[in-house]
Amino acid sequence: MRGVQESFDYKKGGGGEKPETLRGQLSRAWFRNAESGFLAGLFILEGGRQIAIRGPVSELREGQPVVLHGRYEQHPKYGEQFAVDGFEIERPQGREAVLAYLSSGLVHGVGPALAKRILDTLGDEALERIEADPTCLREVSGIGAAKAAAIGGALAEQSGLREVLIFLSAHGLSPALSHKIIEAYGQNAARLIKNNPYRLADEMVGIGFKRADEIAAKIGIEADSEERKIAGLLYALQEAVQRAGHCCLPRSHWLRRGSELLGLPPESLRQASQELVEQHRVVIEELPKLPLLAEGEEERCYPLRLYRAETGLAAALQQLASIESGRLGISVSGALEKWERRSGIQLAPAQAEALRTALRRPIVGITGGPGTGKTTLIRALTDTLREHGKRCALAAPTGRAAKRMSEATGHEASTVHRLLEFQGGTGRFARNERNPLECDCLVIDESSMLDVALAYQLLSAVAPGTHLVLVGDIDQLPSVGPGRVLDDVLNSGRIPVIRLNRIYRQGADSQIVEAAHSILAGRLPELRSSGADADFFFIEDRDPSQALKKVVRTVKERIPEAFGLDPIDDVQVICPMYRGVLGVDGLNNALSDALVQDKRELVRGGRRFRVGDKILQVRNDYDRELFNGDPGRVLDIVDGQLFVRLAERKLYLSPEEVEQIVPAQAITVHRSQGSEYPAVVLPLDKAHSLMLRRRLLYTAVTRAKQLLVIIGSRWALERAVGNDEEGQRFTGLRERLEDQLRGDGVHPEQWVT
């Protein structure tokens, strides 16, 4: 049935845009997916004409009288179809319609013969009589008390479903969302939502506070009601976590955000904030002397799960850091000499010190920029451990980073989620404090990408005696998720830290590496637009439209001709923002137009996919073993369904699975974290001013292995280099670690370099 389940958006050919209404009933379903809500089938109109229908209406049942809302469309293969946007269940009218309905199988236990007897006995108003008093069915020959109750219950359920759909539709909810709500709440959905519409924001993906608030206003909930205040405050805190990466907020900040959202005075929300504490959804912590908080601020407020994660992570790190020496039992000097002799590689002093520390101490942090030998160090450590019969586990936060780790070291690496044996169905990890990882040493690369929740899960699974090595670039962007774990841990003075400064990769004369280190120091890198041996170029153009054309030409023609690189597989365009002429969205369409020859396309959720487009998986899908960051290509579009290559596998994507991928000719800097590309093209424009920061620029530049081309405004480049301000992230991890600082702690000024 692969060819039947199609996207709701495809290139139209001859179909009308005018909304239409059809009355009739479903004859048969060719395809039905309860999870996605999609249905395709044959529909019989009241006059007897048949038409193929498709849309998010999987709750339709054969024989059920309905009104469909949607549009006629011309499918290139199947001809005329009706794309359904929504439907209403109608009460059958007239003897023939009622007989067909009762005979359809929708009413359990009623077949054609019994349906006829019911109508013969109770008349054409049988449905109304049964709904009013199901015991009237006992007048029908062959129906006793139990069967009457069962038939009455089935009809009541159908009636309840009709009322729920009418209610949800009246409040502007799409058919797909209505389907999910009915699946979750059943025929009690309307009653539950009327009692507390804000539960939708908590419990239903795709419905946020603002939509729930609109429903609440329609059903008469007052703007200053406590339930609205509680829901709004919770949403404000969750938004701070999800959009800004905070683990907590000072209470005054939290109340101010809630005030802006709800249109109510901040002080009027204080009682609601306390109610969230009593509901065990928020933790308010009094910490009077923390430098993180504003002067006079004595409280910070956490979602409960992040409070548990942060305090649990701090405790686990403190426990590791409190152990004076590890248990590996390896002669450090002998192991170092042996590895250097066998590999033919002489480690620099900082690398050698990092290796010695990793073998001696239970926890160590290793940080360094591009080309400073982090990967060589990991290889030396893993080789040494395995030479001595020790078990070493390697992992990284993303699939692409784990793959690079494996290729560079020659040892198998996995994602952190896979290492911890994440259970997709339950959302839990099989590896934890009760079932820890079975290894002597755990090495995590790209540790700057660890958010506080994942870091807590990881540390919980580290068994006593296991060494932990955190490797990353502290100068890159912090994790997309809440917290700034690597920064907080390395700057806490709680663990030994080695900073690698000497440049190896690409050669010390690489202009890419020079540019990265200049940017990090706040200096504008040397800019050149040509050069036979150069690997970094700057092409200035202050006009965004002209810069866009230069980006496309550079990717399509100049790089392939001059460097022999494939414009899709080897070149990655990285942007600071989504919107604007030089944003991700516009660039993806422009690059796809220029690079892919096959113009067949599929549009889903506002995103366009063409055959040949580069794509990126952006959610973890553990059932299919696909992970955030996995790259791929669109191979074909078959009957409205994407056929793709993802993570070296070929597969068809259902409509809901398409929502897990994005076009990837151009991606954001955040999406590029943990990856490296042969060539990077970086457009910069004044319109990106909100995102023009040094750390973001440094992260983008360090994604390039062989070639870097920056195109756009010199002003934008200078602003990014000169702007070392970073958006503040409210966390308490560093302070929790510093509170436990022992006399022999290692402060940043004591880092080995």
Image (spheres, rainbow, N blue to C red):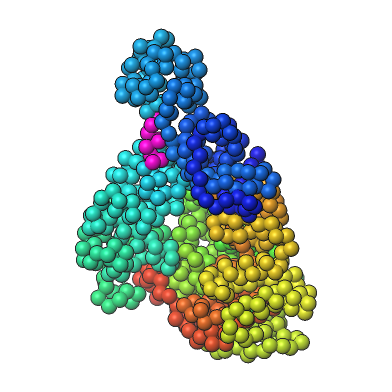
For residue 732, side relative to residue 585 (left or right) = left
- Is most of the magenta stretch helix, strand or loop? helix
Q: Is residue 384 magenta?
A: no
Q: Quadrant of the C terminus?
A: bottom right
Q: Nearer the viewer, residue 1 or 401?
A: 1
- Examine the rendering and report whether any part of residue 565 can be seen: yes
Above-or-below relation of 379 to 605:
below
Q: Which residues are magenta?
A: 157-166
Counting the numbered discs, the total is 0
Is residue 509 toward the left or the right of residue 249 in the image? right
Locate the N terminus and report the quarter of the image it occupies: top right
Q: Whole-percent x and y of residue 4?
A: 64, 42
Residue 240 lies in what quarter of the image? bottom left
Q: Residue at x 55, y 89 (%)?
A: 523
Decide: is 714 above or below 232: below
Counting from the top left corner in percent of width and height, residue 471 is at 57, 70
Give the residue drawn at x 63%, y 72%: 573
Left or right, residue 381 beside residue 177: right
Question: What residue lies at 30% left-to-right and 44% top-to-bottom?
Answer: 194
Residue 239 placement: quadrant: bottom left
- Against 275, residue 689 (above or below) is below
Q: Position of residue 692 (x, y in %)?
A: 50, 80
- Of 496 and 411, nearer the camera is 411
Q: Is residue 369 visible?
A: no
Residue at image coords 51%, 45%: 20
| Pick the front one: 94 or 60 | 94
Q: Residue furthest front?
A: 47
* Left or right: where 541 falls relative to 261: right
Q: Nearest the camera: 389 or 570?
A: 570
